[in-house]
Amino acid sequence: MMEHDLEKMQRIQLLMMSVRRKQRPIFHKAIQPFNVTPQQYYVLKTLYNDGSARVNQLAEKMQVKPSAITIIVNKLVEQELVIREYDEEDRRAVNVYLTTSGEELVKKARRLHGELMRRYFARFSEEELETFITLYDKLDMMMQQESMD
């Protein structure tokens, strides 16, 4: 790799980390009114997207131990945002589902986060947005493919 290529890669990496660091408080502001932690919201969002999941699947996605997910799910059950059901075919397996309240929370938090982020993306032209999405999507797919290899 040529020296200028290395400099570009380092610049991209620094920019991605900088944006991520600056986006974190925006995300926290979006979920703060709902009295959930970022980890709890991630579980809710995963269930919203997937419909349901087993505790071990959630742990795998979040790259934590199943015991950590159990603690998160317990809190969400207390808040009546999710329900737990034992799998009929495998009584050891626990499936987690969103309640209507959990689904509404995700919808509202997504909407609020989108409104907060729109302030920044509104400054891009339509063409810049499409280019950004295309390039980020391409990078995501390449990284996903490489992680499977």
Image (tube, rainbow, N blue to C red):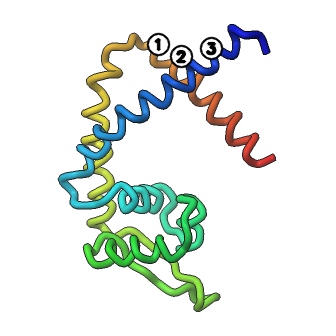
Tell me the SS state at disc 3: helix
Q: Residue at point 32% right, 74% down?
A: 75
Instruction: Measuring from the top left, give residue 70's x and y in whole percent.
Output: 45, 77
Task: Give me the C-alpha separation between circle 3 and circle 2.
Answer: 18 Å
Tell me the SS state at disc 2: helix
Residue, disc 3: 8
Circles 3, 1 touching at the beta carbon (< 8 Å):
no
Instruction: Measuring from the top left, give residue 84's x and y in whole percent.
Output: 43, 80
Asked if residue 127 lies left or right of residue 137, the reply is: left
Q: Nearer the viewer, mark 3 or mark 1?
A: 3
Circles 3, 2 touching at the beta carbon (< 8 Å):
no
Residue, disc 1: 128
Q: Residues within 10 Å of mark 3 (few under 14, many from 20)?
A: few
Q: Residue at point 58% right, 91% down?
A: 91
Q: Quadrant of residue 134?
A: top right
Task: Give me the C-alpha separation between circle 3 and circle 1.
Answer: 20 Å
Marking on residue 131: 2
130 and 42: which is toward the camera = 42
Q: Quadrant of residue 93?
A: bottom right
Instruction: Measuring from the top left, give residue 8's x and y in whole percent.
Output: 62, 14
